[in-house]
Image: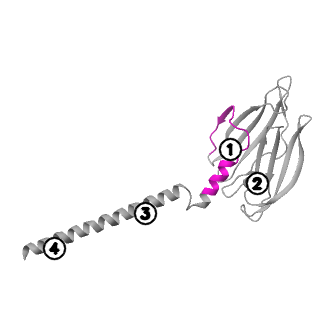
Amino acid sequence: MSLKNGNLFVNIITGGLVVAIVILGYLLWQKRTYTDVNAHGTDTPQVQSAQKTQHFFTDGLGQPNSQTHDAPDETGSGITKTEVFNRDINNDGRIDRIRRIRHETGTSHFWDEYVIELMRENGTWHNITPPGFRTTNGAECALQKIQFVFQPKFHAVKISRPWAESWDTPTMATKTIYQMKNNQMATQETKQVGVVCDVTSLFIEK
C-alpha cells in the first residue's frame, strides 16, 4: 500500500512539472511574439507614422561642412547649434553658404533659422534670405518647414500654416516657392495646398 501511494505521489509531481513546463513555454512564446510585433511597429501605428515622417523628410542641405554647438541658458533657451553648408547657389563658380541655426525655447517647441548668403567678388557675404525664413516645430506638429532643392536649378520651398485654437488644430497650409533672380531669392509661386496639422506631410511624395 505504501509503495502504491509513493508511486501515486511521484506521478502527481511529474504531471505537475510537465504542466508547469508547458505553461512556462507558452508564456515565453507569447512574450517573444509581442516583442517581435512591437519591434516592427505593428501594434504602435502612431510611433511608426512619426518615424516614417522623420525618415522621408529632409531640408535638402545634406551634411554640413562645419558646425558649432552651444549650451542653452538656465531656462533651456538659446542657440544650441549652428551648421554651415558651402554651396554654389547661383552657379558663378564661387562657394556661397547657407547657415542653419537651431533655436531652443526650453519647451517641446523649437525653430531652425536659415541664412542664405552669396559670396561677392571681393570675398564679402551678401545676405539674400527672404523674410521669415525659419521653421516652426513642436511636439504635436510642425507649422512651417523649408526644403532646398539644388537640381536642376536652385530653389527653395516653404510650406506654412497659421496657428489656430491650439497648436494641433489643423489649418490651411500655403506653399511658397522661391527662385534665384538677379542674385536675389524671389517668390515664384504661392498657393494653398491643404488643411493639415503637420506641414511635414506635404513635402513627402506619395
Where's residue 188, x and y in %? 90, 46
Q: CA distance from mark 1 to mark 4?
A: 77 Å
Query: Given contact means CB atoms under 8 Å apart, are the residues at marks 4 and 2 in contact?
Result: no
Where, by quadrant of the figure, is residue 148 drawn? top right
Identity of the residue furthest to the bottom in this view:
1
Mark with earlier residue (2, 3): 3
Q: Amino acid at mark 2?
A: Leu
Q: Is residue 157 above or below residue 4?
A: above
* Res 30 label: 3
In this view, the mark in front (1 or 4): 4
Mark with earlier residue (3, 1): 3
- Mark 1 sits on what residue? 78
Disc 2 element: helix
Which residues lie in the magenta part? 48-73
**Foreground: 153 or 113?**
153
Judge from the rendering whether residue 29 lies leftward or rightward of residue 118; answer left or right. left
- Mark 4 sits on what residue? 8
Q: CA distance from mark 3 to mark 1?
A: 48 Å
Q: Residues within 10 Å of mark 4 (few under 14, many from 20)?
A: few
Q: Is residue 7 above or below residue 49?
A: below
Disc 1 element: strand
Residue 61 shows in the view: yes
Judge from the rendering whether residue 96 lies leftward or rightward of residue 20; answer left or right. right
Mark with earlier residue (4, 2): 4
